[in-house]
Amino acid sequence: MKALTNINATSFSDAASAAQQARQQGHAVAFSGGGTDLLQQIKDGTDLADVIINLRSVADGRAIESDGAGVSIGGLVTLTELSEDPLVNSGLSAIAQAAGSVGTPQIRNVGTMAGNVTQRPWCWYYRNGFNCFKAGGDECFSVNGENGQHAIFGGGPSYIVHPSDVAPALVAFDAVFQVTGPNGDREVSAEDFFLLPITNPERENSLVENELLTGVRIPAVSANTVSTYHKIMDREAWTHAEVGVAAVIQRDGNEVQNAKVVLAGVAPIPWRVQAVEDFLAGQQISAAVAREAGEIGVQDAQPLSNNAHKLPMVTSAIEQAILNLAAG
């Protein structure tokens, strides 16, 4: 493995400034919170960083707090902490369930919320040295190649899927993402944070050079809000979602007043299915309604040659998530 220079940041702003300075000196830079994905990228050769900004030395960003107007989750909160926190489990259960579904206990003990949300795609072409769109090339090899795990929504010119489980749950709760860079702090809505390949095929989010995700803020939810995250995998451990669904509804008894349904594992970004949300509004939840919602969820899908198996998975995942919500 190549030689790496480690810089221990004392704050998020210090990390951003250190990254800017290193790049001005001609270095390639990466931020490391838990480092689980970064280490794999360095091994794969998909991250060429020779300077690592270590965030484990930063004291901030490790708390989950409520101030009455919502819940703030620090970027360095581990996935284990996120999945077990009483505050998150009591009102934001889809986020806790999503965090708890990631990888293995060892990964969740180290991996951070921000790292999970900003991890790079696990497409085998990108991870194995192909000069694809994600690597700065001019071709997505999955279009005519092995595409069984690739996008059925929102693809083109790249057909990667966003690998985060936590991100769809954050989008479903209308999270506000907190970003720090050399020029200060800014906030961006969860939906605006993620970028489709048609905007920039090399990037999955709106972070610019030397910026990092430092936390998220979840607006206060009403007492009649229930949520869930349902995930389908090809094996039970150390794998990403074939299909996942984060569902958040406000209900009056068994009637849906408002719904957010966001898919994982099927698109280059966390994918909202607006048609399902519109259909559910005003409905009394039942097995028939859940089944129809699942069928509506795939109406706009555009599968590639080898990933149509995801269609019944999406239908089933949406149906099951809604039934889970009916049970409270």
Image: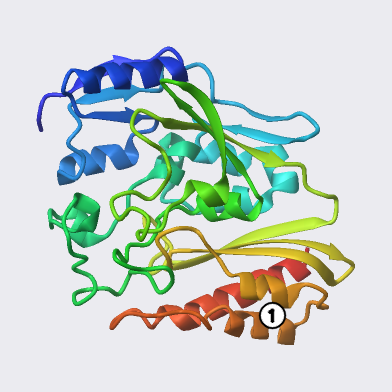
Q: Is residue 139 visible?
A: yes
Give the residue drawn at x 59%, y 52%: 171
State whether residue 181 is above or below residue 324: above
Specify the farthest residue to the right.
Answer: 253
Say whether residue 306 is left or right of residue 325: left
Q: Residues within 10 Å of mark 1 (few under 14, many from 20)?
A: many
Q: Which residue is mark 1?
A: 290
Say whether residue 41 is left or right of residue 16: left
Point out residue 228 in the picture as x, y percentages from the top left corner.
Answer: 65, 60
Image quadrant containing the C terminus: bottom right
The amino acid type of the residue labelled 1 equals Ala
State whether residue 242 is above or below residue 286: above
Residue 126, by quadrant, is bottom left
Point out residue 19 in the picture as x, y percentages from the top left corner.
Answer: 31, 22
Give the residue drawn at x 48%, y 78%: 313
In front of the other: 74 or 213: 213
Q: Is residue 97 visible?
A: no
Point out residue 118 in the picture as x, y percentages from the top left corner.
Answer: 41, 43
State whether residue 16 is above or below residue 282: above
Q: What colouring method underlies this structural image?
A: rainbow
Count of marks, rendered view? 1
Image quadrant containing the N terminus: top left
Residue 159, by quadrant, is bottom left
Residue 218, by quadrant, is top right
Kind of element beneath mark 1 = helix
Give the residue drawn at x 33%, y 39%: 36
Say whether residue 32 is left or right of residue 71: left
Say whether residue 34 is left or right of residue 145: right
Give the residue drawn at x 36%, y 68%: 155
Point out residue 195 in the picture as x, y percentages from the top left corner.
Answer: 42, 53
Specify the farthest residue to the left.
Answer: 2
In front of the other: 266 or 87: 266
